[in-house]
Image (tube, rainbow, N blue to C red):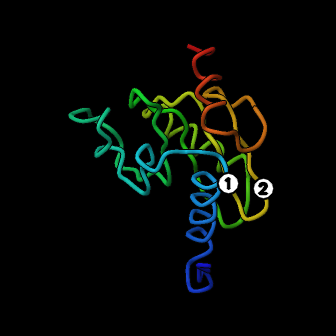
Amino acid sequence: MVVLALSHLLPEERVRRRLLKVLIEDLGYPKSRLVVEKELALLPHLSGQNVPKRRLDLLVYDQGLSPLIVFECKAKGVTKAALDQVLGYNHVIGASFVAVVGEEEVLCCDASGQGIGGLIKYDALLEMACRLR
């Protein structure tokens, strides 16, 4: 059994690592569709565009490599300011969903900021995105 030693990490990084573990191991998110801590300008679908100099926490693509969900990880928890931050990023990214993840709570929303519940399995989120398009 492998135990992750997370105590030496910054609180936000602990949240991100726990989230990645849950997404991959419990909710079926393919590792090949995850982008972790990347500048917006370096995202393939934004290549060559004039985008703000910002760095996202986690982006998940669908099987066609369109943005599916953007996650913002916060050490202090889910706040309106954090939701506004990820919605601002998503204005540029164009994902179907956004989420704010804290140590103890998760808020998933559609691209307009309307809550859709907690973390959702990858396949179910794909189906939801297809219905929105």
> Where is the C terminus found, in terms of image quarters?
top right
Q: Name the residue under label 2.
A: 105
Residue at the image point whose x is 42% and y is 57% from the top: 37
Cβ atoms at labels 1 and 2 below 8 Å apart? yes
Give above or below for 14 relative to 38. below
Indicate the position of residue 36 as horizontal and vertical percent values: 44, 55
Q: Which residue is drawn at 57% across and 43% down?
A: 86
Find numbered disc 1 in the image and state the secondary structure of the residue it sits on.
Answer: strand
At label 1, counting other C-alpha atoms closer than 10 Å, the crowd grade (few under 14, some 14-19, many 20 or more) is: many
Q: Which amino acid does label 2 sit on?
A: Glu
Which residue is identified by label 1? Answer: 101
Residue 126 percent coordinates (x, y): 58, 27
Image quarter of residue 48: top left
Picture coordinates of residue 85, whole percent (x, y): 57, 46
| Residue 88 falls left or right of residue 39 | right
Q: In which quarter of the image is residue 4?
A: bottom right
Q: How many labels does the image show?
A: 2
Q: Is mark 2 on a helix, strand or loop?
A: loop
Which residue, as the protein is rendered here, is positioned at the far front? 1
Residue found at x 61% / y 32%: 123
- Closer to us: 100 or 52: 100
- 35 sits to left or right of 6: left
Real-space Cα separation, disc 1 to disc 2, in angstroms:
6 Å
Q: In which quarter of the image is the N terminus?
A: bottom right
Where does residue 63 sit, x and y in percent of width and height? 44, 30
